[in-house]
Image (tube, rainbow, N blue to C red):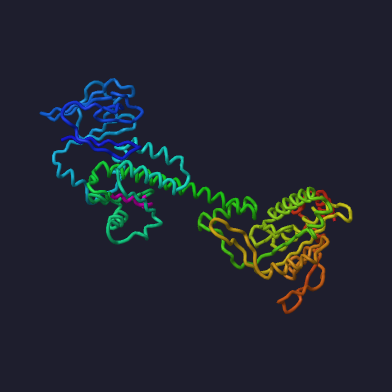
Amino acid sequence: MWNLTITNPGSEPVQIKLKPGKMLIGRRVTSDIVVTDSAASRRHAEIYLDSISEMATITDLKSSNGTYVNHQRITGVYRLQNDDVIRIGQTVMHLTKIANEAADLQGISGTHLFNRELVLEAVDENPLLLYEITEKLNTVVDLESAIAQVIDLTKRAIGVDVCEIILARDFNTLKLDGTDNLSIKAIKSASVEATQLAMCVPIIGGGKPLGLIRLEKKRPGSRPFNKRDMQFAVAVSHQTALTIQRMELLVKIRTEQQVKQLLMRFVSPIEAEYGLKDFLKSGKLPDLTEKKVTVLFVEIADANRFAKRIGSNNFSAFLTAFYQNTTQVVFKKGGMVKYLGDGVLAVFMETQDKMAAEERAVRVALEIIEYVKRTHPGEPDKACIIGVAINSGKALVGYAGTQERAEFNVMGDLIKVTYRMQEYAQPNRVLVGPVTAEAIRNKYVVQRAGNLAMRGQAEPIPVFEVSLPKTAPFILKEDDMSEAFKEIAEKLKAHTDKT
């Protein structure tokens, strides 16, 4: 007895028994075997089964797009053999000669090792269906949609009632009873586990389990799973593994880009690259941890009134330029930036390859004030006024938030004190706390500016004002000067050499 199993991407498989004599294959509805594929001719091919010898042959009836047997286009009469594959367009027909009908009804069962040979055989036997899967999955950019596509096509191609794809992250949800025993065994032994009406196929990529495909037939009278069903399921498993790996790579690339963009909001591009490397190793941004830092806070005094005085358009342009300049200066000195309304908070941490954090913060402060004076002198009643406060001590520094959204944060009493100091730093002064003052005393002119009373502080906090650097020759280094001071530095250095 010969069976012909017809599979088409658009419908469930159909199994028919060949009848003795001629059977017409074609798109015409009166054909013995109707093929609705657009590549099929009205009278496409003819199968002949000899009732005495049980020999089966197929003849192409001069069709437009040809008849293929085992990937080869046939001409004339072709003798069919057991397990031959006939293809017309995207319609595939598997021919099986059944010697024992009772054994055929038992289908496949037991354990089948999931190895390279099994995958290659499965891919080779299902090129058209895999082509359709690949074509559809290549247009999908999220894993959930890809899984839905695979499930839909698999249910139609094999004719199952249940098709479930369980990802590795959900393995702990598998139960230890019923058909899930097959699932657990398939995962642990990397094998295809099957009964007559249930089958579990592992999804393996890069030598590790990525998921599991579980298939089940529940309708009364359902045909048992056979070898071709298993081959198709294995081929689907292989394609699904490639898709999962591609999706994981896309997620990784997107995450890296998001993290890099996040880091570049607070640090220079070079330091963002270093931060990204740490993220790729640990899988997360640094949590809030207590560190010794120097913080700088600068704010435009009475920004709303200043905006009214110069006009909203002029204020918008000035604010943008102010942010850009401040950020560039902070990045140049190895600091991190957080924007706060009309002000900027900069954080400097100790590093081996840079000068002390306190000195870098002071240099940034003086450059910011010089920039504001130079770019927006204005009339006396329209000039921009800022104040800069610098403080050193311990604070919580790091990233807070969720995996989807995180923000750089600095928290603690150190920040509160610095905010209050900034209020007294106007107009255009630089005030520093006692720890900062002690660290820079030998390089800058530091004068006592008074005491700052803070709620919760037992004693007032001494505050100091910083002016221009002391003129000792050893601190006049060309690489520490802005372009505007290079010429002065050269003249002073020449004078020092003579004397």
Which residue sits at x=82%, y=68%? 447
Residue 278, picture quadrant: bottom right
The quarter of the picture where the C terminus appears is bottom right
Visible residue check, residue 474: no
Which residue sits at x=18%, y=34%? 2
Q: Vertically, is 325 above or below 358?
A: above
Q: Vertically, is 236 above or below 362?
A: above
Which residue sits at x=29%, y=20%? 62
215 magenta-colored: yes
476 magenta-colored: no
List x then y, in percent, for residue 372: 80, 54
List x then y, in percent, for residue 213: 34, 50
Magenta residue span = 207-216
Visible residue check, residue 157: yes
Q: Main secondary structure of the magenta part?
A: strand
The one nearer the camera, 297 or 176, is: 176
List x then y, in percent, for residue 123: 32, 39
Direction from residue 20 to residue 466 in the image, left or right: right
Q: Residue furthest left?
A: 52
List x then y, in percent, for residue 283: 51, 57
The one nearer the camera, 207 or 229, is: 229
Direction from residue 106 to residue 332 in the image, left or right: right
Which residue sits at x=45%, y=47%? 247
The quarter of the picture where the N terminus appears is top left
The one nearer the camera, 354 or 65, is: 65
